[in-house]
Amino acid sequence: MDIKEQIIQEYLTQGGGFRKLGQKYGISRTTICKWVMIHQGIHNLPPTEKQQQYSVYSMSNKYNTLNTEKQQSAEALQQKIVVLEKQLAWEKLRVEALDTMINIAEKDLKISIRKKPGAQQ
């Protein structure tokens, strides 16, 4: 049995952590983790209790956290859109009112208020 198989069997039977095995054998914990995952995938072995506790829970927890953050961000953006649409509608009314006021003033006072295109400054 080579060192790789020995480490995998030790992890699966004794349930030690990747770090402890890495320190014991002088191999990176990520390398050991990859070996174990590949071995479990090839032999259709279920995840150990430790793997279920840490990886599945933490991944689903991270996913839920990210999903909640995205949802809150989307809601905040929707609220901002509503506010900006109201401001835009108000400004359109304001521009229309000012334009109407200028038209009436030009007609009643018979003077040109608007700047003519191409006029000297």
Image (tube, rainbow, N blue to C red):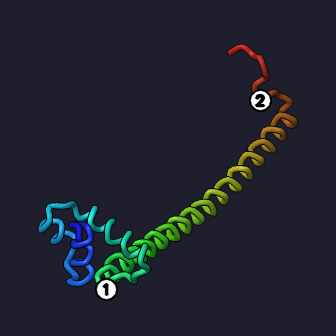
- Along the viewing direction, whichever of 3 and 47 lies nearer the viewer: 3
Instruction: Answer left or right for 71 relative to 88.
Output: left
Q: Amino acid at mark 1?
A: Glu
Res 41 quadrant in image? bottom left
- Outermost residue on the top side: it is 120
Q: Which residue is mark 2?
A: 114
CA gap, disc 2 and disc 1: 79 Å
Q: Is residue 70 above or below residue 52?
A: above
Q: Residue at x 23, y 64 (%)?
A: 29
- Along the viewing direction, whichever of 74 and 39 lies nearer the viewer: 39
Q: Residue at x 21, y 75 (%)?
A: 17
Instruction: Answer left or right for 119 relative to 18.
Output: right
Residue 120, percent from left and from top = 72, 13
- Along the viewing direction, whichever of 64 and 42 lies nearer the viewer: 42
- Outermost residue on the front side: it is 1
Q: Amino acid at mark 2?
A: Arg
Instruction: Answer left or right for 27 relative to 73.
Output: left
Q: Which residue is mark 1?
A: 49
Is the residue marked by circle 1 packed among few (<14), some (14-19), or many (20+) residues within 10 Å?
Answer: few
Q: Quadrant of the C terminus?
A: top right
Q: Is residue 30 above or below residue 5?
A: above
Q: Secondary structure at mark 1?
A: helix
Q: Is residue 93 above or below residue 14?
A: above
Residue 94 marker: none
Q: Earlier in the sequence, mark 2 or mark 1?
A: 1
Residue 106, percent from left and from top = 83, 34
Q: Residue at x 86, y 37 (%)?
A: 108
